[in-house]
Amino acid sequence: MDPQQQPYSQQHGVPGQQPRGESIDVSYVCDEHTARRLSRVRALAVWRRPGDWACVALTVWGLTIWTAEILSVVGGVEGGAATIGLAVALPLSGLLFYAAAARVNRGLRVVAGPGCRMAARYAADAVKLEQTGRRVTLRYSGVKKVIVRGGVVFLQPRGFHFEAIYNYGLFLPREIVPDEAVARIRAARG
């Protein structure tokens, strides 16, 4: 691993958690997998929204009814047509989800594409992020949720409903959010 990609505590040999007053500085140069990794977790988060599940349920129901009607008119199948329709609709829904999860988000490709540099400074009360010329300061008290999924951390700001996740929220590679930073953010949220 490149020394630039290691968390602050590993770079400087400081074991365990940083003292509360010191900042934690990390940087990371994205590789060819970073944007895809962030996009997958983003797709999973978007698909967890209640509105999307209602849309999926209505789509599956509509496809089931449509397939059952076609089978009853064309094939003369009355009994079991809804089951056959459901057998068609569920894999189709799964295929749509897979296509959404496999696609790399354009916005994430811009900030996390190969060679893009990310840096973070975790101070006592806020994190300052720098991603491809974009600078963001987020106070820990303004973080509603901290979700860690494998190699990705999602920070959801307060005041935004989960439905707004599609347009707002920070999906960050785990390399710039070390354990000490996650603990600091969660402790400050209270």
Image: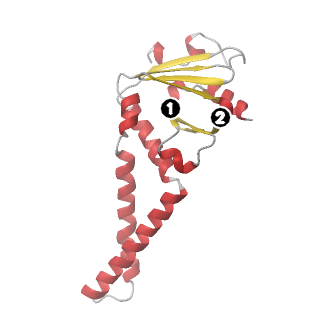
Q: Quadrant of the N terminus?
A: top left
Q: Which residue is mark 2?
A: 142
Please, which residue is most extreme toward the right here?
190
Locate residue 143, reporting x and y percent.
Answer: 64, 36
At horizontal 59% and vertical 10% (from top left) the residue drawn is 12
- Element assignment for label 1: strand
Q: Quadrant of the C terminus?
A: top right
- Element assignment for label 2: helix
Q: Does residue 125 appear to the left or right of 46 in the view shown?
A: right
Locate residue 50, reporting x and y percent.
Answer: 54, 58
In the image shown, does 130 or 184 lie closer to the viewer?
130
Q: Is residue 185 above or below residue 84?
A: above
CA neighbours of label 1 inside 10 A, class few (<14), some (14 to 19), many (20+) = many
At horizontal 34% and vertical 77% (from top left) the residue drawn is 66
Amino acid found under the numbered disc labelled 2: Gly
Q: Does residue 132 appear to the left or right of 50 in the view shown?
A: left
Q: CA distance from mark 2 to mark 1?
A: 17 Å
Amino acid found under the numbered disc labelled 1: Leu
Q: Which residue is mark 1?
A: 172
At horizontal 44% and vertical 47% (from top left) the residue drawn is 43
Q: Quadrant of residue 97?
A: bottom left
